[in-house]
Image: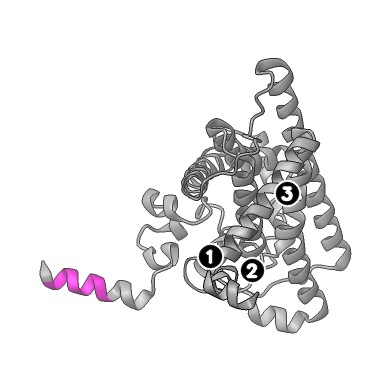
Amino acid sequence: MDVLMGYFGLPALFGSTYFASSLNVLFFYLTWTTLVLSHPPLGIELLGSFAVRIIFYWIPTLLFTLLELVMPGTSDDLKTRRGKHLTVDVMLWVGLITFINQVIATGIQGLLHALFVYTLAPKYPLFNIGTTLPMPWNIIKHTLIVLSLREILTYSIHRFLLHNTQRFTRLPRFHTIHHKYADSPCFALKADYAHPVDYIILQFIPLYLPAYLFRIHLLTFFFILAIVSIESAIIYSGYDIFWGLLGRTVRRIDRHHSPKGKSMDFGIWGIVDWNAGTAGGRRSETADTIGLDEGLVKELRKRKMELS
């Protein structure tokens, strides 16, 4: 039998990485198909979204918080700046508000789904919840589109609505809750700590509106939600232990939430801020905005002057 299998090359086939990957895709497809055929689309969407938030936001957030509570000295050494220590009851309160906001967002997500399916477009949910798996190219394309539009919407809403005290009064007042602990360095629980109206405008709409407009596959949305969730936990952690664009973003978020940072860094990754001249209060802060090394930027400027 072994000789026969060896003659046809079956051991090499079954032991190959390609075969193992194909088998994993097949099992995932069967599992997803069974889930879609046996459960209502609304249940898959809501429970899946909540599960993604628990895995990719709450678990790393609680780990960051545990480090701050158990080893405050070490935590201070790793933070972008030092500041006032928050008590355990304050942390619990912030975590409770964060959890409530995410429950509200999940509820709105369910209401929109029900409104769209049962009144506006029967049998066509907001997300594509079919048995067909999305192709890798479509996942990458829709992820880039949604995250890019989210960055633009976040910057516009954040700067022109929530920080525009000359034209608006109530919305900026709601947004002050998000900036409540400015004397303390950022902490991961603060990512979704906000007034519910502020949370819906600044967190829910920029993420869900592009996803709804393009009616992306639900699995693609889960992938995007996982990216956004782990991103929120990291960039709001305040820990200056990350490199590149991610490390710069951590410092940008903490700078915006400092006592004098409300007039700068309105976006998430800083790309729109850099083009609009609101990166760190000055357009010249190229390296701090897009994650380039400061020495590299200086060298590029020197070469440019020599060429001119």
Q: Name the residue under label 2.
A: 238
- State which tag comes first along the sequence, 3 or 1: 1
Image marks 3 and 1: residues in contact by CB distance under 8 Å: no
- The reply, left or right, for residue 301 in relation to residue 52 is left
Q: In which quarter of the image is residue 122?
A: top right
> In front: mark 3 or mark 1?
1
24 over 64 or under it: above or below: above
Q: Outermost residue, top direction?
A: 119
Q: Name the residue under label 1.
A: 18
- The reply, left or right, for residue 251 in relation to residue 183 is left
State how many labels appear: 3
- State which tag comes first along the sequence, 2 or 3: 3
Q: Mark 3 points at which residue?
A: 31
- The reply, left or right, for residue 128 in relation to residue 289 is right
Q: Provide the secondary structure element on which disc 2 rests.
A: loop
Q: Outermost residue, right direction?
A: 89
What is the distance, in whole Å, between disc 2 and disc 3 at their CAs? 38 Å
